[in-house]
Amino acid sequence: RGGGGGGRGFDNRPRPTECNVQTNHTRLEILNPHETNFDWQFYRVTIRGAKFVEKNDETTGEPVKREDGSVLKELVPSDMRVMEDERKKRRFFNGPLAWRIMKKLVADQRSKDAQFVLDYDGAELAVGPSNKSIPEDGARYEVSVKRDCEEDDPDADRIKNRRFFVTLAKTHTIPFSTVKGAIQGMHTDAAMKQQLETAINLLLNSTSMHSGMIKLASKLIFPLDRQEELCPPPQWGGRGQGGIPDTSNRTKFLLQGLSQKVLFSDDGGRQGAALILTDTICEWADKEYDNGGRDFRRIPLLDPRGGRPCSIAGVDVGDLRRTIQDGGLRKKIENEIFKLRLNVLYEIPINAEREEAMRARGVSENDIRSRRRRILKDKELHEDRNADSSVRGQKIVWEPETYWWDKKEGVKTTVPQYFKERYGIVLKYPNAPLVYLGRDGWFPIEFVFQHFKKTREANSTDMVQKVLTHYDRISGTKLIADVTAKRDTLSHKMNAAKALEMYNLRIGTEAMQFRTNILSQPQIKFGRTTKAAKNGSFDLRDISFESPATLPSFAVVDFTGGRNGVCDTYVNRLLKRCAYHAIEIPTAVKNIRSNAVTEVYRGSIDRAIDDALEVVENAVYRARDVYINDSTGVFNRYNTWFKTQCVDKDGLILECIALPPLVKDGKAGLLIYYDDDDKDNNIPYDYKYSHCINTTNGTKNARLMAKISETETLIDLHNLRYHNDRFQASRKLEGWVDVHLSSYIFKCEDETQLDINSVEFTYKHPEEAFKVEVPTLLLVFLPSDKKALYDEVKSVTNLCGGFQTQAAVVSTFEKQRNPDQFCSNLAIKMNAKLSKRCDMARSWEIDLVWIREHLTLVIGIGSASGLGNSSETVVSASTLLDSYGIRMTHSCFIQSKSSGISDHIMEDILEESWHDYSFDNGGNMPMRVLIYREGLSDGNFSQADNEINCIRRVLKRLKEVNKMDVDIPLTYILCQTQHNVRMVPADSCDGVKGNVYSGTVLDHSIMQMGTKMAGLSIDKLAQSNIQGKKMQMFSAVDDSSDDFLLTAQGGLKGTSKPVYYRVRLNENKVWGPIGATPLTKRDLQDCTYQMCFAYGSATKATREIPVIKYAKKLSNQVLSELKYLREGGRMFDGEIYNLRSTSDLEEKSYFVEVTDSNNNVIRRSPNIVKMPFTNHLAA
């Protein structure tokens, strides 16, 4: 019958409390425990350019000459401009050229001394073992390498060499006995541990690359000749030989690699063994040659399919016999070329007599052809900045005849003419574009080819699907087997193990196994029933929401063009499912035909993104006309009114009723909620009256009221509703009761009553003076699942419109076998988005352990930064408003680009979260704080400490401002989602469908050392005197690790990846309010897991806790909108939204400024997403 929700193929086996898991860790071992009498010697690497200069006599200063009279030259160091800028210097050392130089240095020295050992990995640091041949202190080496390609590149013979000087200066040594002790679990101080991690990770990467691994950006991938053997075997769903996945146009392929790093584990506060964490990776790369590199068919930018040019850089262009004129097409081509690294290749004819002479000397045909080739490698698109260029400022010349230069005075030469006159080459496509490659100049695009590099923006549907397919093939327990096989290939087939043996180290071969706990799942409480989760999931069958929301108004945008009435069918079915789950929809609203509030977009799909703002505005105007002006007459027909919310000029949120426009001026009015009996009423007295009545004795203030037949008494219209085809009145002790409406009456300020039809009146509060919430929700029907249009609609409605949206894709709706289930899943999202402070709507409740016992402020902080040269970071925070985990409030700020959060942003987050929490909890202040922070890696602990200290200062100030006689304990947790730890069942009985159970937690043996911050925010004197006050001490300071890995989601496909929770500070474990309990490791695990069931948009446990999931989602939504706020702003409903910044502070401060059409400032807000009516934003 279609219950709605769930259907995940539950496993009915009893849920265990423990299980065995395998991880992708192996032990780092000492090869020969008795060989310890040597050191690891470290060097600082300096690389300088080299150039030939005339050699001068040291005495006379005159040039030294050879016997034949020619001047003798010598090679001397030269400065490299890249070393003058620290950022460029780091990029150089991390880049391919520095690695080629060091690799060639080692190869040159090993050709002289087979015992020479030196390892290097993209920094100014190298290491070698003292029991082998290693460089002397200050040793300088001359190295000659190919600047733009590897030594074994097929084009290497046509690429010039460049010389460099490498100097190695000794810095420090680490005795191998110290290395051995650390690896075997003996105590090692934090500084030494960090040095050893750096050194061992250097060795892992260096030995891998010396063994033939390729560095693709920052990842190490296997060489191309190894890729096919790494494809999963047939029994795993692999394609066997020739199975390297590629794109449909065969210009990019998916390559596999391996990442390895060392960690020193924390086992119950003690240093554990050194472990190697190994993970399989895959990366999309731009092909340089077709067919995986086995033959050398290059990938051209210009693809003449069937003899006729069809595409440039994958963009279809049609016929290139004419120049490309379409501006949009030009921009698309330029964007695609900009993502690529480029090679240039063309062949010039050699004089026939010279070729014959070469053959006579025995030169092969391949060598002769090679000498015809002109090649440039690894170039990129640049802007022509030559002052005298005819196309200055351009990267691509679309009409080749517009670029010319004076070959000789008065004679202009174009690129096609140059190649014809200089080399006798006639271009096949003289009207095709030219591209500028920096100092190398302009080239016809038919000479340009793709270079091998990591693909930028590998996010097409095809590419994402093939990555998912790859990981599906090696999912679950097969993942550990795949990692083991790849590690064996690297270690033994490629001989990386032998390179590591030089340092007396080896990597274990067996994946590690551990016994883990499985946490208890929470009970999910709905309105009429309680549901038990099954492996992290529950369903919506036969349930009413715990606290249903109200849908006062809605509008619809149909981007599908209204085809076949599918949108109307979807909207009607969705509203029925909302009512099924007890979301309240007023009767009058139910009877508004959906097409009356639907804006149908009938333009081109390609133009939909550009037109989205106008379409949404039109939908809003339609909705206002229907709900406020009652243009369909539905409210008049039912003799009722439209109830909603509004914001006045002072920012006060008010409940209101829309009064239809008057005939004489066509303006609508508002009747504001006002309660004389409410002693805490903070609503201005002026809102008590709704009308100005014209009488013979002058003008009176009056309020519109309803007279009830049963009692002949007057009741306020806010206490009257038309529900299920009958009127109901709200009574304090009885709730909503059925009544009969007699009439509408004016109650004047002098207590007299007047019939509304007997007097003339005007509205005291015109609707145009307020911001009225119409529509409450915008339903968006999309033509496809492409993200660009979705993001555009979200940004317009969330940032500018200030109202919620619920999107659905037409194809997804049409293919549903059970549309009711689909609509039920949307209903829970709508219930979350419609939640207001007045109704506290939530679909279900979870009684969160530890959080429920005391007023606890829980905040999740996430961030998003733009790529490349983007200068901003968006920081968002989501705050729990109650102990049930569903209802949240959000804030969003912008700062200069950084992984850390600036002090003033952190202060704003804490203050807004504190205010929203206390306001929602009746003015009660939180007594303890729990913060989850996403986006910081192991190397950013110092930034985490800065944030903790800032939070402490804010909490101290809030304590003083609110006159709280307590010290507020803080728990600060890093949530690391981007890590390489994999955790799978050790056996089929230890999991479900190849994945561990939802709630599997691992908190020992492989936790990294050094997470916990030293020092609490309460001093020793306060600790000794705190007993008997409002706070209590639980225990002495505990330095043991509280870190844990949690797999919250119940995965049915792929490999469930845990979240790594790194507990940097846990003061709630040491002290807290009277009546509270300590936040132990187990309680922290339980409440974190239970929060994962409180994502108001899904009937399952999410991988990340919702406060983090929402914060990240919000940050990415705002980030996608910044370019529009920067570039002239957004105009919506007569208001213009611009992103502004000020440098008044030490650091830039950003805010959104809203102005009218005359550039008058309406408001400014550093909180980018302050929505006046609802708490949820990113649902």
Image (tube, grey):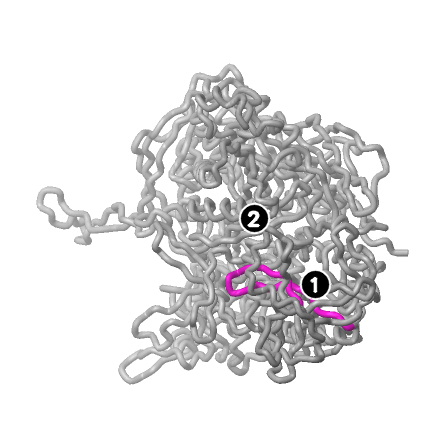
Q: Nearer the viewer, residue 347 or 298?
A: 298
* Residue at left offset 73%, top offset 48%: 238
Q: Earlier in the sequence, mark 2 or mark 1?
A: 1
Write down the residue under mark 2.
916
| Amino acid type, label 1 | Asp
* Residue at left offset 50%, top offset 23%: 1026
From what the image shows, is residue 58 above or below residue 685?
Answer: above
| Amino acid type, label 2 | Asp
Q: Which residues are magenta?
A: 639-657
Q: Are marks 2 and 1 in contact (CB under 8 Å)?
A: no
Q: Position of residue 446 (x, y in %)?
A: 51, 71
Mark 1 surroundings within 10 Å by alpha-carbon count, few (fewer than 14), some (14 through 19), many (20 or more): some
Disc 2 is placed on an element classified as helix
Q: Nearer the viewer, residue 999 or 716?
A: 716
Q: Quadrant of the N terminus?
A: bottom right
Mark 2 surroundings within 10 Å by alpha-carbon count, few (fewer than 14), some (14 through 19), many (20 or more): some
Question: Which quarter of the figure has residue 681?
Answer: bottom right
> Visible in this render: residue 843?
yes
Q: Farthest residue in the right direction?
A: 1
Q: Nearer the viewer, residue 43 or 513?
A: 513
Q: Farthest residue in the front direction?
A: 697
* Residue at left offset 27%, top offset 50%: 51
Q: Quadrant of the C terminus?
A: bottom right
Write down the residue under mark 1.
716
From what the image shows, is residue 1030 above or below residue 790?
Answer: above
Q: Farthest residue in the top direction?
A: 34
Question: Which quarter of the figure has residue 303?
Answer: bottom right
Q: Indicate yes or no whether the magenta region holds residue 77.
A: no
> Visible in this render: residue 508?
no
Q: Indicate yes or no whether the magenta region holds residue 653.
A: yes
